[in-house]
Every structure is written in C-alpha cells, then in structure tokens.
Amino acid sequence: MRAGSGRSHRSELGLEAPRVLRTAILYHLRVVVFRGILVGASAAVAVAIVLCACSSDGENAPVDGSGGSATCAESPCKLTSPQCGCPEGQQCTVHEDLGARICAPEAPSPPGSGEPCDGLCEPGQFCLDTGGQSICHVFCEGDGACEPPGGLCALPLQDPTGEPVADAQLCSINCDPLTSDGCASGTKCVLGQEEEPPGRWFTECITGGSSSHGEACTSWHDCTVGACVNVGGNSRCLDWCDVDSPACPADSSCMSYSSPMEIGGVEYGTCVPIP
C-alpha cells in the first residue's frame, strides 16, 4: 500500500482496500408489504403492493396505461424503463418470495433517481434503504441506464436464501466521494466494488452519521464522510482523498491501495493519520 503526504509522495501500508458494500441487495416481501434492504443496512422501507391481475399466457392482459403497452415482450411485465405489461396506474417490480415480477400501484408525484423516497419511486426505479435514508435507484440491464462515471449496473438483487433474482439489477448512484455531491441530504458518497470480475469500482450514496475524520467508528454509517477503516487495530473514520491531488487534514496523509480504487480516471485513497 502507498501513502503520501503531498502531491506526489507515496509509501506502502499493509491494508486492504475498504469495501462499502457487497453488490447484493436483500429484500423481503410479506403479504402486501415490500421491504427494500441494502446489505449492511439496519432499517427497511415498506410500501404497499398488489399482484398483477393477469396470467402469463396473456389472458386478462393489462390494458394500455401508465404501466406500459398492452403487449409486452417480457412476462408479466418489464422492470426497466420504459416499462410495459402492467395495468394503468401500476408499475413493474419484483416479488421476492416467488422470484417473480409483479405490478405495484404507482405513487402520485413519485421521486426520481437519487432522490429521497418513502415508498414507490418513478416507474423503472426502486426505493432502496441505504441504512436509514431511502433513495430511488434505477432498474438496469446494463451500464447505459446508469449515470457515469460512478454509476454502474452493479447492484444485483438476491432473495433471502442468497439466490439471485433473475434479471433484476439496480444502478449505483453517481456521486463525488470527496464532497458527496450527487447524494441526497442525510447521505454521503462512498466507494463500492463488484464482487465478480473485473471487480470495477463504483460510487453509491449511503446514510451517514456524526463521527468526523479520525474519530472512532463501528460501521461506515457512523461517519459523516469517508470510510470506517481499521488502522493499527482501531477503527476510525477516514476521509476520502484524490491520490494525485491530495487534500487531507494536517495530521494525515493520502494512502492509496495496491488494488487501485479508480473511477473516471481518478484514483481514490483514504486520509490516514500520521503516527
């Protein structure tokens, strides 16, 4: 590992690159309550849902409406925008217990991608709890639906048994780890990494806490900005830094990692206190 106390000076430290989250999202459905939970989160958001009143063979197929056209190439409905297959006034989402897609009632004036939510988002999005504050995330089939450079189609959904839900993924939120620009109030920008090769890095907004740089922490959610990193046996909140243009507090230096955390041509590190 490398750490530097200036624009161009770096040295090595034996720490693993921190990971904010696994790229798996667990969510639970019981009767008509839909709960979205980010891995590591402690709270859930609940919204009412209803099942699509149509059969897979097209009998009693939905009519044209806000849920999309009457004909749909995906059964029973399409998650990504533009959606199709749901009755008017409903949108497509996923029934976790069945591993199947369902139609849920649309909310009036729903929030959009990256905005706080307390229920349903715009069609084609999912209200995801990020550890206290829920944020709308876009359903995706590829990175083209996500906002670059930090937004990737990298958040697969899993059922409670750990099995992946077929063709159900979310975009991460594009944001600036140094300033948290792009994140809603009450949340902060952090770095995450794909579990599967090539292991790309992405940005995501999660609920932050009240602990500042250098203060003790037990989770990423404790820190106002940055990450909760174990240094010398003690977990501390450490600010993010740009390895090539570090701007760390006076008592810290910018540490880069042997597996570079690069997004959009910027290599990120953490500001580590100088012994």
Image: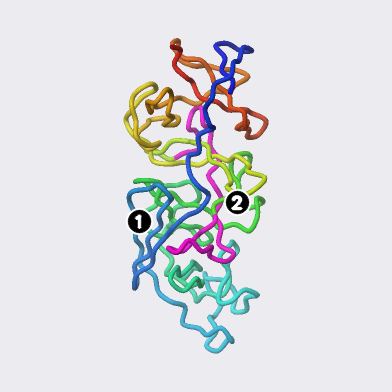
Where 260 falls versus 196 (above or below)?
above
Residue depicted at x 37% and y 46%: 131
Amino acid type assigned to the residue bearing label 2 in the image: Cys
Quadrant of the snapshot with the C terminus: top left
The range drawn in magenta is 156-183
Viewer-proximal residue among 100 and 160: 160
Left or right, residue 151 beside residue 206: right
Residue depicted at x 40% and y 74%: 50
- Asked if labels 1 and 2 touch by Cβ distance under 8 angstroms, the answer is no
The residue labelled by disc 1 is 45
Q: Name the spot of residue 69 as percent of width and height, x first.
A: 60, 75
**Label 2 SS:** strand
The residue labelled by disc 2 is 153
Where 166 falls versus 45 (above or below)?
below
Quarter occupied by residue 59: bottom right
- Counting other residues with Cα less than 10 Å from the Cα at mark 1, is it few (<14), some (14-19), or many (20 or more)? many
Q: Name the spot of residue 166 as percent of width and height, x first.
A: 57, 66
